[in-house]
Image: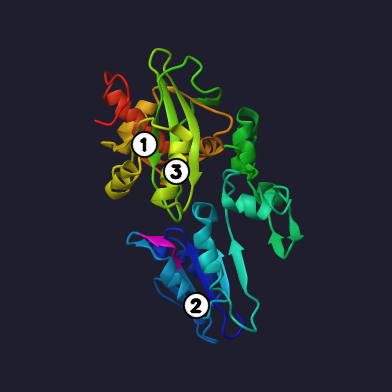
Amino acid sequence: MAKGIRILFTRYTMVSAHLSIIPEFLEKISLLGFENVFSVNKSEVINLGNQSDILFRGIKTSAGNQTASLKSLQGISTWVLDEAEELIDEDIFDTIDLSIREKEIQNRIILILNPVTKEHWIYKRFFEDKGVQAGFNGIKDNVCYIHSTYLDNKENLSSSFLQRIQNIKDNNIKKYKHKILGGWLDKAEGVVFENWSIGGFNPDGLQTSCGMDFGFSVDPDTLVEVAIDKTKKKIYLKEHIYKNGMKSQELAEIILQKVGNKLIIADSAEPRLIADLKHLGVNIKPVKKGTIESGITRMQDYELIVTPESVNIAKELNNYVYADKGSKLYVDAYNHSIDASRYNIIYHLDNPNLGKYYVQ
């Protein structure tokens, strides 16, 4: 490394770099015979000759988001984001990106990833917006694309390994294209809701009400109208609001314009906002949430029908995934309109004999 180079190597979560990444560096240093050239500890590799170093950090640790502390690191000229698909918040990327600004040194950002869904900001920013086809190798708009697969290294792979790849190709072409060739998915793997489709809203004229989840600066305020057909086991969803940064007065005006006096079941974590909206004439009350798992399980008993205009609901259903399906943990992303729907659904399934919807 040239004198003065400082590299920041990150993953979204990296609690124990000394157990995962650093052993790989130690192996390479040993293979090259450079043990006396580098000093290695739990979070850093230092070149003893020119004092260049590689820092290993997590963007989010068990203690919470540490984007601010990463931004404050001095002298970074190269940022490597490993497993970049795990970073779902583009704003965090931009925050760190803008801090990589050393003078008189070529600054680089390197993203290493396995492609996921086409809804991911990396696909939209570096492929869709730039008109770059998946699998492209080359340079466009000052971005170097390197896409590698097993086909680039077939001569060094065993016949048994190649046969396993062939078996996947023969039996599950979708898995082959994604897992083996690194294709981008139209829908994320491990989605929570699989039984849903696009269709008309409430064709049988069922009584409807709404669910609401609150955001503000980063997350959107969402309002979803819901109709539940218990006989046909169908839930109809219609998106009315999916917008950031609204204050109470503006939000109330839009709600009244969109759904009038329909009952809204809202996130109970915002009692003051609920009180403000009620004061402004909105027919709203808080939900008794229960666990996320119990609410989702009840929703999964129904087929979800989403109107064609409800693009954000559809996007969330395509991307709301299990973090660990075995323990029913969910990734806390792509869930704003889903949460709004869940609040309404669990309220009415728990209160089946309310009759007309009104605030009690």
Instruction: Please name the amino acid that badge 1 sits on.
Output: Gly
Say if the magenta span includes residue 60. Answer: yes
Q: Amino acid at mark 3?
A: Glu
Give the magenta range. 57-61
Q: Earlier in the sequence, mark 3 or mark 2?
A: 2
The span from disc 1 to disc 2 (Cα, nearest Å) is 42 Å
Q: Which residue is mark 3?
A: 253
Q: Which mark is residue 228?
A: none
Which corner quadrant of the image does residue 289 belong to?
Answer: top left
Residue 50 versus residue 86: which sits nearer the camera?
A: 86
Residue for badge 1: 326
Q: Note whether residue 292 is visible.
A: yes
Callout in the foreground (1, 3)? 3
Q: Is residue 345 left or right of residue 30?
A: left
**Which percent across, then down, holds residue 218?**
46, 55
Apparent side of residue 115 relative to residue 251 in the rendered image (left or right): right
Helix, strand or loop for the magenta stretch, by majority: strand
Instruction: Report whether 242 appears left or right of 285.
Output: right
Q: Name the residue that disc number 2 marks.
A: 35
Q: Work out whether mark 1 precedes mark 3 in sequence or the reverse, and give the earlier one.
A: 3
